[in-house]
Structures are given as structure tokens and as C-alpha cells.
Amino acid sequence: MARTGYTLPVFAVAAAKAALIYLCEKMDSLATVEIDLLPDIAEISIPQVAILDTHSALAITISEPGDNLDLTRNTPIWAWVRLSPRQSQALILEAGEGLGKTSSGEAAIYNYARRLFDANLLPLIPTDKTVTVSIILPEGRQLAQRTSNEAFGVLEGLSLLGTSGISQPLSAADYLEEFRLQLQQKVKTCSNLVFCIGSNGMQVAQRLNIPETAIVQTGNWIGAMLVEAGLYQASSVLLLGYHGKLIKLAGGIFNTSSHLADGKLETMSAAVVASGGDLETVKTVLASKTADAAQKKLLELGFSELVFTHLATKISQKSQVYVQKYANYNLKVGTILCDRQGAIISQDSLASELISHFQ
């Protein structure tokens, strides 16, 4: 039988509570803390806790999600807690290194996690003090690169997300089902959809005044979601986002998870050849460590516009063929490619027409 565990917010709150108790009660040791999960109760192990000075302490927990396929397993979570004279708020939550931020710069600590912090920390805070908690995930920035966080607007790290403290084992199919249901609802009122890939895609969508009612989340399942759009007879889909993800589609890779396939540099190299580039340019692309580095090299060589316009066109063409094959439906697909900063690199000829639906 699959074991349940606890979600990342629980371990963050446990570390913060341990540090606060240690600081306020001047304890000699603290092995565990009890966390109110609203409504359940959990006892969380505290491997390390220390006083830093008279006004601050640091505690560490280790993530244990049970048998869930969760990349945060065994991830250390640090909570740096500081006491100061009472301000307007009794509890201030901050994003330290490795905890992500939203596109507006706020700590990626969502509703349930904030409720957990309030329930477990507010009763312990002296009436004349404010507690500031910085959550630090030393491995968070690195782990975030293996997630779809950027697709949901979370930058520079992991998020404290969820609606429950209990981590139930979920399959990839469960997450895909959520995206499918979202698409099915949105296509009822908006037949022209926009798939935003990465937070940079969201930035571009905002600049283009694309309404939230048209935007659909896909994670790495771009192919499956394109087919879903075809099955529910959407009029069009505009693919909008980071080139390092979307160019995989030009190579026929429709699940963009790096765990399954890559081929970005090889696909870019084929586009160099198709755009008239020579062997030395191909070698330059293949020698690049990342798609970003390759794009910058092509920009220096004066080939970026040609190559990425070709790629945008190829992405749209391949996507239309993919939907026709698996949904037997003629779906209009346009593509806009941007870099990590949200600057548009290129787009295909259909993209302008699809954008006009929202102007």
C-alpha cells in the first residue's frame, strides 16, 4: 500500500515553528514539533535547530512526501526566524534563496501554506513582537529547473503550494487531467485559445492584452493539450513562450519534459541548414551548452531571425499535423517564440492573425 507523506508547506511551517519555540523558550533541545494541518495533526522531526543571536534562530527540516513521485524528497528546508518590535503585522513571510517568487515579486507562498503559518505561529508570537520568517530552500533553484513552475509564473525556485498537508501519491495522469478539465471549460466561452509556456510566455501574453479566459496551462503536455483542443473543436491555438521548450515540437517531441527527450540543439541545427547556414554555424550550435547560448551565438552571426522564424513555422506545421493525426481535426496553430526575459524572438505568419482575436 502506498505511503502518504506531507507536502512541502508542512515542513516549512515545522521549521519556522521549531525556530520560534527555540528562540522564545530558550530550549536546550527540540526533536519534533506538532503541526496543525487544518484539521489534522502531524508530528514533524527537527534534525537541526540553533540560536543565531538573541533575536534570531534557524531550524531545518527534511521533506518526506511519502510514496508520491515528488522531486522534493529529502530536500532540506530552512527557516530563519527573527524577532523585532511589533509592527503592523505580527507575522511576515519572506522568500529566501530557493523559494520562488511570483511575476509580481511576491513570495510563492499560497493560500493553504499561509493559513498553516498563521495557525501554527501566530499563537506563539509575543504581543509586543513581530516575527519575520525567511524560508530558504538550498536546492530549490536547481530543483525548480526540473519542474513546470515557470509555466505557472513561479520564478527562481520552488513554491509552497497545495490545498492539503497530506501528500497523496499522484500520477502524471492526475495532473494532466486537471489541465484537460481547464481547457474543456475555457473552450466553451473562448474558441481561440492561447497556450502560455513558461512565465515569460505569460509576460508576453499580458503585454499583448490576451485575456486570462483564453489562457490554458499545459505543463509539459503540449501535444496532449493540442489534441484536447482539437477534440473539443477549438478554432485556434496560439503557442506562446520560451523557445527552449517550444522548439522541441519542431523536432516532433510533443511532451517537453527533459526527462523524456531533448533534441533542442539538434533541432536548431537542422533549422540552420534549412535557413542556408554552413557547417561551421551548425557546429557552433551543437557546441553550445544550452538553447539560450545557441540563440545568442546565432544572433551574433546574424542567423537568429532566419533560424527562429523557420522554427516557429515548423512548430505550427508539426502541431497541426499532430492534431490532425490524433484528433482528426484541422486546428489552426500559430507560434510566438520568446527568450527567458520575455522578449519576442520570432513568430510565424499565422501568429498576427491569431493575436488579432484579442485586440
Image (spheres, rainbow, N blue to C red):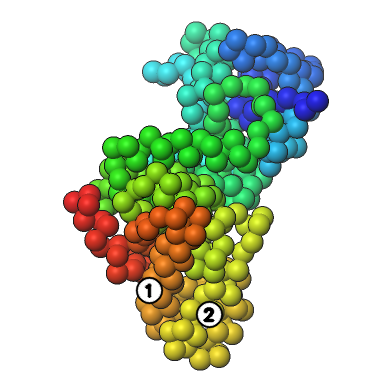
Q: Residue furthest front?
A: 328
Q: Which mark is residue 24?
A: none
Q: Amino acid at mark 2?
A: Ala
In this orientation, does residue 167 appear?
A: yes
Name the element at disc 2: helix
Q: Residue at horizontal 43%, vertical 78%?
A: 307
Please rate how many residues cluster around mark 1, counting C-alpha atoms within 10 Å: few if below 14, some from 14 to 19, many from 20.
Answer: many
In this orientation, does residue 96 appear?
A: no
Q: Is residue 312 above or below residue 24?
A: below
Q: Amino acid at mark 1?
A: Thr
Residue 339: give x, y in percent of width and height: 43, 62
Q: Which residue is mark 2?
A: 270
Viewer-side residue, 41 vs 282: 282
Q: Earlier in the sequence, mark 2 or mark 1?
A: 2
Viewer-side residue, 331 vs 84: 331
**What is the quadrant of the N terminus in the image?**
top right
Q: Residue at horizontal 51%, vertical 91%?
A: 278
Q: Is residue 32 above or below residue 292?
A: above
Please rate how many residues cluster around mark 2, counting C-alpha atoms within 10 Å: few if below 14, some from 14 to 19, many from 20.
Answer: some
Q: Which residue is mark 1?
A: 309
Residue 208: give x, y in percent of width and height: 26, 53
User: Based on the displayed image, in which of its 4 quarters is residue 355 positioned?
Assistant: bottom left
Residue 352: give x, y in percent of width and height: 25, 62
Residue 87: give x, y in percent of width and height: 42, 19
Q: Is residue 236 found left or right of 244 in the rendered image?
A: left
Alpha carbon separation for disc pair 2 and 1:
13 Å
Viewer-side residue, 261 vs 103: 261
Q: Residue at horizontal 56%, vertical 38%?
A: 175
Q: Is residue 44 found left or right of 234 in the rendered image?
A: right
